[in-house]
Image (cartoon, rainbow, N blue to C red):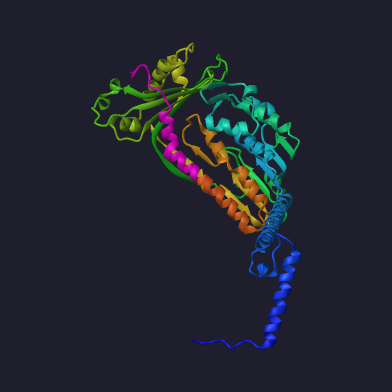
Amino acid sequence: MKLSPAPSLAELATNESEAYGSMHQTTSAGVGESSPDMAGDGVGFKPVAAGETFLVTVCVVCCFVICKSSYDIMKKWRGKLDVYIIGSGPIGLTAALLASQSSATSKIVMYEERTRAQLMGRSHQIMLDGRSVSFMRKLGVDFDNLEGCWEKDRFYTRIGIFQDYLLSVLQQRCLPEMSIHLGTKFTQQIANTIHGSTKQLAVVIAADGLRGSSSSILGLSDEFLILPCKAYGAFSAFERSNQPQVPTPDTRVRKLKLDLSAFGTEFRVPDIIKSSFHLKVFGTFRHRYMSLLCDKTESNLVRQLRITSDPVILRNIFQESFNNYRCKGEARMTDMEALSMRCSNRLTEIKLAHRKEAVAYVEDEHLIVLVEGDAARNLNQSLGFEVNLGLRGIESLGKLFQYLSMATNKHDILKALTLKVKHTTRLNEDIIRTKITAELKQTKTPSSSEVKR
């Protein structure tokens, strides 16, 4: 065992004096106060140190939040967008409503080739499904003050009425700065005046329809990609000038059976694969449209309707179908009306055409170009829900405006545009995978199971 050396007398004297001083301080401190020895052991100062650390942490966090919020506010203030919209159809006007509600927008300019009277005179009917109705309500659309009719969650109105209402809503909004040029065709001369700056981007939304020329003027490719939708269809349209243009709900018929044995022996071959058709009658009483859809099968009946060269067959199918499932109080279609009806000659595959280049960034001019509505995607046959596809395409515009307004460099801009491209790609895939199928399932079973001729 190792022993420590004994302390000297001087050391003992020093220790005694220190002990006496410590006892004196403890006595004079009073009850409840810690001695220096206790403090040295960390008993009294731990709560004080923890409290100071907590306060410092709170101060640092508060300073960070305040600085970050101030920075974001400065970025939003610095990054206001100038938005130019070409076309004042339902999609262009809805895009303008979105821009007017965004805090990232400083100016909105719209160009439309038609006058307001011409816009109001557009008579064909549009249908807004439940999702589109909810989307439009968020933008301030009051359907109670809009002429039309309801069927469950779907709203039906004339496109001219809808456009005039949206124009009125836009003109009532004082912020941001807004200029609507009706009766003004978008030309190359106007395009040359549109550009952004290093501190402020310009966004151009081309929504002038399938036959519009703005995308080409802005330098985008006119190339479309064609994708099959796994369904066959035919389309017909006719007009009754003596009927009112009153919005009318669709008539949908599911699992319609066709008996075409009277057209020849080729239609009498027994089918191993049973095929059923789905009929939709839509439009106002004056402008009536019909679509006939079926799944993509290889049954004998479908094959014969795809290769037939006799235009009378489908014409008779549409005439008999309309007369069986027309609305109450609606007159039958006569043979003379059937002869004047525009009609498909045969079943064709339903296909989606979408623009290969729908988003572009012109770095030198600080300009972003977006293509929306029918100018971006369209079906080769009218099925009565195309406006909803266009509205799906612009649902992401609000977020895109925010991201672009806060972009500080090219990387941020391209990142925001990548999100927009992904949204467009998902929409196109959903149309092919689910939209046509959902349209087929939304019909009702007919009271009469067959249409014979």
Above or below residue 435? Residue 192 is below
The one nearer the camera, 288 or 308, is 288
Quarter of the figure that contains the C terminus: top left
> Magenta residues, as a range?
426-453
Residue 213 x %, y %? 61, 42
Above or below residue 4? Residue 387 is above
Query: Which residue is at 42% across, 17% downward?
Result: 325
**Magenta includes 421?**
no
Name which quarter of the figure residue 111 lies in. Answer: top right
The one nearer the camera, 29 or 349, is 29
Query: Which residue is at 65% across, 25% downward?
Result: 120
The one nearer the camera, 406 or 47, is 47
Count of marks placed on residues: 0
Residue 409 x %, y %? 65, 58
Residue 11 x %, y %? 68, 85
Query: Which residue is at 68% across, 44% downward?
Result: 83
Residue 297 x %, y %? 32, 35
Name which quarter of the figure residue 185 lies in. Answer: top right
The one nearer the camera, 140 or 128, is 140
Query: Which residue is at 74% across, 74% downward?
Result: 21
**Magenta includes 440?**
yes
Q: Is residue 266 visible?
A: yes
Above or below residue 311? Residue 406 is below
Q: Is residue 346 visible?
A: no
